[in-house]
Image (cartoon, rainbow, N blue to C red):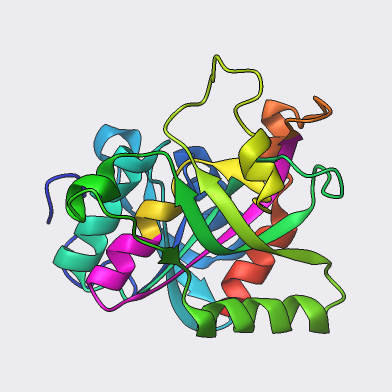
Amino acid sequence: MSIHMAAKMGDIAPAVLLPGDPLRARYIAEHFLENAVCYNEIRSMLGYTGAYKGKRVSVQGTGMGIPSLAIYVEELLRDYGCRTLIRVGSCGTIQEGIHIRDIILVMGASTDSQINKITFKGQDYAATADFELLKRAHDYAAGRGIPVKVGNVMSTDTFYNQDKDFYEVWRKHGILAYEMESSALFTLAARYGAKSLTILTVSDSILSGEEMTAEERERTLATMCEVALNTV
């Protein structure tokens, strides 16, 4: 049992999906996993372990933002020995050729967070996904005719940015979308010698203002979950 999770050693599978929303964790467990058992309800951050195509898989909510995700990922890696972590979440695109409901496989994550600056004493760290997981996800999607975008995203600490042109320099340098967690996930996984990947569904366009409803964000992300589960 760790500080933030009530699970005993062995309750959590080596492979874990990481949605930010704990209700999304419950939805994934109920709709994709067989014989799913809830191992955590502390702070209502739900976690479940079940089976997908005969393989044990867990799904653990992490909350929003790098500080919250970092707590759960650190404990999953350090206290429970998890070694394959895939974030499944939503993002806001800043590119004209990407639209809501599109899927992004994240290759790398830039960030405006200071956590890596603190860790690396002011120097920049390139937070990247595990190539094997990235290739496996891409190959699965291609084999099923699921269109995906592959590239870099921005992991930001600021949801409501007061600068209306905050994304422009990042857009010009090829950043596909804004989200709030991947940089920390990739960094922590590297620290513990684990594999990590982020798979995102575009929930809104920062350029056009087009967006999913709150219910769609929770319930209509089945394709992303399919790709993630078949990757692990």
- Is residue 199 covered in magenta? yes
Q: Position of residue 114 (x, y in %)?
A: 29, 39
Figure check: 175 above or below 112: below
Q: Is residue 171 above or below residue 133?
A: above
Choose top left, top right, bottom left or bottom right for residue 103.
bottom right
Q: How many marks?
A: 0
Between 197 and 232, which is closer to the camera in this rendering? 197
Front in this rendered view, residue 3 or 207: 207
Residue at 27% across, 78% down: 193
Q: Residue at x 85, y 43 (%)?
A: 96
User: Viewed as shown, does residue 2 lie left or right of 145?
Assistant: left
Q: Would you say 64 lies left or right of 75 here?
A: right
Q: Which residues are magenta?
A: 186-204
| Residue 182 image point, x, y percent | 46, 53
Q: Is residue 170 magenta?
A: no
Residue 31 is drawn in which quadrant?
bottom right
Q: Is residue 218 visible?
A: no
> Viewed as shown, does residue 148 lie left or right of 13?
right
Horizontally, residue 103 falls left or right of residue 137, namely right
The answer to whether one can see residue 77 in this image is yes
Q: Residue at x 47, y 43 (%)?
A: 20
